[in-house]
Image (cartoon, helix red, strand yellow):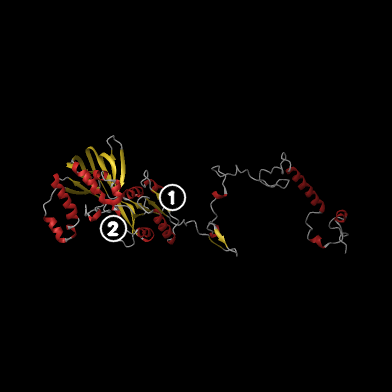
Amino acid sequence: MATPSDDDRETGPAKGDASDPAHPADAIYADGPDTAELRVADAKLAEQADAAERPESPAVEEASDDGSPDASGGSNQPDPEEAAAPDDVIREPGDVAPDTADGESGEARRVGTEGETESMGGGEERPNPKAALVYNPIKADGDALREALTRLSAEAGWSEPLFYETTVDDLGDDVTRQALEAGADAVLVAGGDGTVRAVSEAMSGSGVPLSIVPSGTGNLLARNLKLPLTEPEAMIRAVFDGDSLKMDVGWSKLQRQGGETEERAFVVMGGIGLDAAMIANTNAKLKKTVGWVAYVDGAARSLPSAKPFRVMYQLAGSRLHSARVQSVLFANCGSLPAGLELIPEASVADGALDIVIFQPKGPLGWIFVWRRVAWDNSFLRKFRAGRRVLALRTKDNSVRYSRGTGIEIAAQAPTPVQLDGDEFGEAVSVATRVTPGSLVVVVPKDHATDGL
């Protein structure tokens, strides 16, 4: 059966005319537009397309004020400036709070192959922890320490470590601050007592653990903490599986003759007077060769010309004193090399400093000093019978002990000062204080810390 053409439908009888033969599609399109209407609509769309290509003419006519479609079929789009929030800020998608309707969390989620969702997680992870090694290339085997730390870091799942060398101009404090700024989770120090002091100064109050890898001649802090002195790898391993101890740090504010001041930390002990002069007179080359024994050379150079000097001193909370002394020590630790116990009761974690005042009277007085340090403190105190002997002995004033949170010392003339075995020039006054538990030090697992 032939299908009538569009022209036939246009010129044929009107709809509903009984003479117009029925067509199966008539029931479907009975209410739709006829061909003529479609052509008119096509023509209007073509005109709008032509107008859109001309910049000077709008593509569509302006919409009505009420937002309803205009005569050309466009819709009213609000001006973004007028649609801004009351604070006149046009919100970006990132500014809009997530939709939490219908129990949704509003958080990013993974979508599986079947359309199921699950939390993406993440966001709380951080890069693997990393350690930093600060070492004195003159006193420590840098290559061996680098290899050991890199290997043990990898075994523990830590990131590749950072390495810093000290220099003549930077004893270790500046590079330690760089390591902390780089995000080091632990710092290791290898060098002499001066390097340990400088690194500890920068670490104080940071909360980051410090591991002391014995490498220098004195190793005074390591000795006082009873750390393994001949097993550097043991102290490296302690970073990953060891324990920690909060210890005190001492600070000394030095005032020079010209009025300028400088504050430096110490972790073992500092002093003003003969002890500092002995260190200043110690031959540097001899010290590198024989270690702490070289201080005997410094003592031999200093003792003949040693003269007592007048100081005014005052412990925190105590009255002012005046005395003629040979040396005043302020200590955080009490042990010296060769097993000598200068201050047997000293503790690195008691929140106090131990003060030792040496004021021997003549050559005989120095014999009393030596007896007190080398015999009484270092030998007799280890035994019950020896302690009984000490209790019965007549007291002498060659060595006087005190304890407090700090001491202020003023000398009549500029006097040498030392901190942890390094000379710090001359000062006319020294004010010391202690910051309790401000340094976190690493010790091997199950290391005995009683009595430290």
Residue 49 relative to residue 398: left or right = right
Place of residue 25 in the rendered image (x, y in percent of width and height, measured from the top left): 81, 61
- In the rendered view, tell whether residue 81 sits above or below residue 373: above
Given residues 80 and 190, the one toward you in this image is 190
What amino acid is found at the position of numbered circle 1 in the picture?
Answer: Ala
Residue 279 relative to residue 83: left or right = left
Mark 1 burial class by Cα count in 10 Å: few <14, some 14-19, many 20+: few
The answer to whether one can see residue 435 in this image is no
Q: Quarter-wise, where is residue 214 in the image?
A: bottom left
- In the rendered view, tell whether residue 242 sits above or below residue 74: below
In this view, the residue farthest toward the top is 258
Given residues 181 and 84, the one toward you in this image is 181
What amino acid is found at the position of numbered circle 2 in the picture?
Answer: Lys
Q: Secondary structure at mark 2?
A: loop
Given residues 152 and 242, the one toward you in this image is 152
Q: Secondary structure at mark 1?
A: loop
Residue annotated with mark 2 = 226
Disc number lying in front (2 or 1): 2
Given residues 303 and 335, the one toward you in this image is 303
Give the alpha-carbon distance from disc 2 to disc 1, as whole Å: 31 Å
Place of residue 302 in the rendered image (x, y in percent of width and height, measured from the top left): 21, 43
Quadrant of the rendering where the C terminus is positioned: bottom left
The answer to whether one can see residue 417 in this image is yes
Residue 315 relative to residue 150: left or right = left
Residue at left offset 18%, top offset 43%: 304
Quadrant of the rendering where the N terminus is positioned: bottom right
Place of residue 108 in the rendered image (x, y in percent of width and height, measured from the top left): 54, 57
- Disc on res. 182: 1
Mark 2 burial class by Cα count in 10 Å: few <14, some 14-19, many 20+: some
Place of residue 376 in the rendered image (x, y in percent of width and height, measured from the top left): 17, 55
* Tag 2 near tag 1, CB within 8 Å: no
> Earlier along the polypeptide chain: callout 2 or callout 1?
1
